[in-house]
Amino acid sequence: MYDHIGLRVADLDASVRFYTAVLAPLGFVLCSRDDSGAGFGPKGEPALWLHLHKGKAQGGAHIAFRAPSHDAIKTFHTEGLKAGGRDNGAAGHRKDYSPTYYAAFLLDPDGNNVEAVSS
C-alpha cells in the first residue's frame, strides 16, 4: 500500500486547476498549497503531491484513482476536459481489461495519463 505519489509539474496553477476539477468527484480536495507545490487527498490527508519543476514537463506517468460510481467517472472526464485535460479515453467499459472494468482517461497538463476506474 502506498502513502502518497509525487508528480513534477511545469505549471503549478494549470495543474492545480486540473486536479481540483478531476479529483473532486472522487472525494479528493486540495489540502495544501504553496509556491513550490500542492497536495490533494481525501479527508484532508494528501495522497497526491504536485511539485513545481522548472523546465520541460516530464509526463509519462499513469495514475489510476478508484471512483465511487460510473457517474463520478463521467464527471471526472467532463470536468477534466473543461479544466485543460486532453481526452485519452472517454468513460466506458473496458471489457478487454475485465468484464466489469469501467474507466475514463485524461492527459493532464504535463502529459501524464490520469484514470478514474471502478469495477
Image: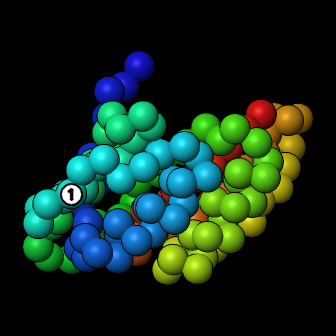
- Image quadrant occupied by the C terminus: top right
**Is 33 located above or below residue 117 in the figure?**
below
Give me the residue at 42% from left, 34% from top.
43
Q: Give the image location of residue 53, x and y in percent.
A: 15, 66
**Is 80 located above or below residue 118 in the figure?**
below
Image quarter of residue 13 = bottom left
Image quarter of residue 97 = top right
Residue at the spot of label 1: 33
Q: Which one is in front, 47 or 58?
A: 47
- Classify residue 107 as left or right of residue 87: left
Task: Please rate how many residues cluster around mark 1, counting C-alpha atoms within 10 Å: few if below 14, some from 14 to 19, many from 20.
Answer: some
- Classify residue 98 as left or right of residue 56: right
**Is 31 located above or below residue 59 in the figure?**
above
Image quarter of residue 51 = bottom left
Q: Is residue 92 visible?
A: yes
Q: Give the image location of residue 95, x and y in percent.
A: 86, 43
Give me the residue at 85% from left, 35% from top.
100
- Classify residue 16 as left or right of residue 90: left
Q: How many marks?
A: 1
Q: Is residue 110 visible?
A: no
Which amino acid is tagged 1?
Answer: Arg
User: Circle 1 — which element?
Assistant: strand
- Image quadrant occupied by the N terminus: top left
- Classify residue 35 as left or right of residue 101: left
Q: Give the image location of residue 111, x and y in percent.
A: 42, 70
Give me the residue at 14% from left, 60% from top.
34
Give me the residue at 51% from left, 65% from top.
21
Outermost residue, top side: 1
